[in-house]
Amino acid sequence: MPLVRRAVPEDAEELVRLRKIMLDSMHPSTDVSWQPATIAALRSHLADPAGELTAFVVDAPAPGSGLAACATGAVHRGLGSPANPSGSSGHVFNVCTDPEHRRRGYSRACVEALLAWYRERGVRRVDLHATAQGEPLYASLGFTRTPSPAMRLTF
C-alpha cells in the first residue's frame, strides 16, 4: 500500500499542478491566472490542522520529484435533517494522479485516507462529482449515484 500523508502548506504548488492536470482532462485550458490565489488559499487551509479543508497525498517515488497523487476534501456545516441529523457533510474534490504514476492505487489510498478523516470528524455524508474515469473507483468505495440534480449560479 502506498504511503499516504496529510498535505502540508509546502505541498500547495504541487496540489495545484495536479489540479491543473485534473481540470485539463475534463476541459483543456491555457488559463493559469487562478493558480496563485489557489496556492495561497491552500497554504492557508493546510496550515490549520483543525481546519475544515484538507488534502491527502502520495509522494512520487523518486525523492524530490513532487507528488504522485492527491485527494482534497472539505467539511460543510449545515443544518440537520432526518437523513443527516448533524447537518455535516463532506465534499471530495481534486482527486488526481500524475499520468506517470497511474494504476498503482495512489488515488484510492488518498481517497481512503480522506474518508477516514471525515469519519474522525463525525461526517456521515460525503458527496463528489465523478468523471467517467473515476466512477469505478468511487463505486468500489461505496459511493452511489443520487437522484438529486445539481444546479449552479455563477456571478
Image (spheres, grey):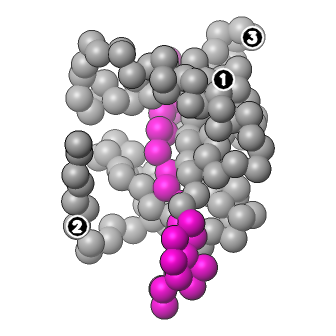
Question: Which one is closest to the eye, mark 1 or mark 3?
Answer: 1
Work out whether residue 102 can be spotted.
Answer: no
* Of the image marks 3 and 2, the number of the one nearer the N terminus: 3
- Which span of residues is magenta-colored? 77-106
Inter-mark Cα distance, 2 to 1: 34 Å
- The label shown at residue 64 is none
- Considering only vertical position in the picture, is 83 above or below 27? below
What residue would you read off at disc 3? Answer: 63
Inter-mark Cα distance, 3 to 2: 44 Å
Badge 2 local density, few (<14 within 10 Å), some, or many (20+)?
A: few
What residue would you read off at disc 1? Answer: 11
Q: Quarter of the image holding residue 123?
A: bottom right
- The answer to whether the residues at label 3 and label 2 have Cβ atoms under 8 Å apart is no
Q: Is residue 34 magenta?
A: no
**At 27% across and 13% down in the image, what residue appears?**
30
| Residue 142 in the figure: left or right of residue 118 | left
| Residue 18 in the figure: left or right of residue 48 | left
What residue would you read off at disc 2? Answer: 149
Q: Quarter of the image holding residue 116?
A: bottom right
Question: Residue 147 at what x, y percent from top left?
Answer: 26, 74
Work out whether residue 127 can be spotted.
Answer: yes
**At 70% across and 20% down in the image, what residue appears?**
10
* Of the image marks 1 and 3, the number of the one nearer the N terminus: 1
| Amino acid type indicated by mark 3 | Pro
Q: Nearer the viewer, residue 38 or 123?
A: 38
| Amino acid type indicated by mark 1 | Asp
At mark 2, the secondary structure is loop
**At 74% across and 34% down in the image, what residue appears?**
47
* Of the image marks 2 and 1, the number of the one nearer the N terminus: 1
| Residue 3 in the figure: left or right of residue 108 | right
